[in-house]
Image: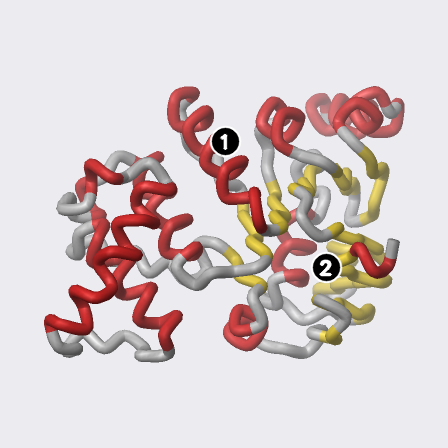
Amino acid sequence: MAEDAILSAKGITKEFKGFVAVDNVDLTVRRGTIHALIGPNGAGKTTCFNLLTKFLQPTRGEITYKGQDITRMAPADIARLGLVRSFQISAVFPNLTALENIRVALQRERGDSFDFWRSQTVLNSLNERAEELLGQVGLSGFADVHAAELPYGRKRALEIATTLALDPEMLLLDEPMAGMGQEDVERTSALIKGVSANRTILMVEHNLSVVSSLSDTITVLARGRVLAEGDYQAVSKDPRVIEAYIGAAHG
């Protein structure tokens, strides 16, 4: 199992002034899978996700990525290792077109930083790859549309495309379906399935029908601890999980 792990957390704990938001969590994400982190409100999902993506430092515990200890590393440094949180980059500039946004992200991937003053030749050389990425996320017809004018679901697709421009080996998605209507949810689910073909995905998601259709493994958190883990079939029937969700709904 260990050689199969791409990201793993051991005993991660996060305390805020005496309040334990994440309590001794162990988590292993297997290479090439879609792994979902779910739980009722207040379960510690977001804090756990922020620990794994290095936006928060754990009070205790250890996080490793591809066998390397990343516990004290910064988000930008782990991004260079191929572990990228979507929407952390948000190279979605409202006044740039969809194509221009992806070109900016591609420049970053090349190490050119945000050099808006690059020669037209250099920028045009990135167009082919940018158009390919737009196609991957279903935005081929939106290349010349300014990001500010894109419908909400399409804007999220553009954010995923800018993340893919960094060519991550592992993608961390923070509630990718939040605020979406059914049509956008279906389109984004298909997009996530598509981009998972040659990479690993860890996502925090509230939409349980999305989780059931996409995830290989689900970790359920409640009160900052791991309550259950397994495929959807197993966790959805676990009495502790049912109780946690029903209890939260009536609490």
Find residue 105 and report its horizontal and vertical position in percent. Answer: 33, 64
228 or 15: which is nearer to us? 228
In space, the residues marked 1 and 2 are separated at their CA atoms by 23 Å
**Residue at the image position 66 percent from the left and 26 percent from the top:** 212
Contact (Cβ within 8 Å) of mark 1 with mark 2: no
Q: Which quarter shows the C terminus?
A: top right
Instruction: Point out the tag, 1 or 2, that comes first from the N-terminus.
Output: 2
Estimate the x, y position of residue 11 in percent, counting from the top left. 86, 62
Which residue is found at the position 56% from the left and 53% from the top? 171
Label 2, on which residue?
Answer: 6
Label ID, residue 189? 1
Q: Nearer the viewer, residue 107 or 70?
A: 107
Spot occupied by residue 77 in the image (x, y as percentages of width and height): 55, 77
220 shown above or below 184: below
Q: Secondary structure at mark 1?
A: helix
194 vs 103: above or below: above
Mark 1: amino acid: Ser
Asked where in the image residue 154 lies, by quadrant, the reply is top left
Disc 2 marks a residue whose amino acid type is: Ile
